Image: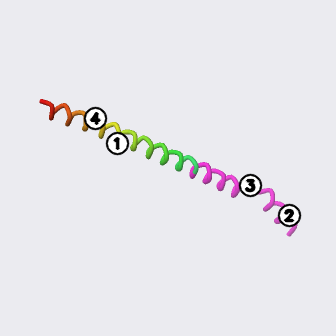
Amino acid sequence: MTKLFSRFLKDESGATAIEYGLIAALISVALIAGATTLGNTLSNTFNNLSTKMNTATAAH
């Protein structure tokens, strides 16, 4: 019984899996935040371009 308990305490495979899961979650959050920021920047850029094109078209 004590050998089984000591072997259980030395087994780190579960902890490693949890660590990999946490790392994957953090990477996912970073990717989502980056994609959101990039999406907002692109949206603002295209909106500004559209406004300038509409202004140029209205002037002629």
Say how the picture is coloured. rainbow
Question: Residue 49 got which mark?
Answer: 4
Is residue 1 or residue 8 the one in the foreground?
Answer: 8
Q: For the residues marked 4 and 2, what is the alpha-carbon distance in whole angstroms?
A: 71 Å
The spot of residue 17 in percent (x, y) is: 65, 54
- Sequence order check: which comes first, mark 3 or mark 1? 3
Q: Which numbered mark, 2 or 1, is in the foreground of this view?
A: 1
Tell me which segment is drawn in magenta.
1-25
The spot of residue 11 in percent (x, y) is: 76, 57
Picture quadrant of residue 4: bottom right
Report which residue position mark 3 lands on: 12
What kind of element bears circle 1?
helix
Position above or below: 16 against 58: below
- Sequence order check: which comes first, mark 2 or mark 1? 2
Report which residue position mark 2 lands on: 3
Amino acid type at circle 1 is: Ser
Q: Is residue 21 left or right of residue 48?
A: right
The spot of residue 13 in percent (x, y) is: 70, 55
Q: For the residues marked 3 and 1, what is the alpha-carbon distance in whole angstroms?
A: 46 Å
Amino acid type at circle 3 is: Glu
Q: Is residue 50 left or right of residue 18?
A: left
- Sequence order check: which comes first, mark 3 or mark 2? 2
Q: Which numbered mark, 4 or 2, is in the foreground of this view?
A: 4
Q: Which numbered mark, 3 or 4, is in the foreground of this view?
A: 4
Q: Is residue 23 magenta?
A: yes
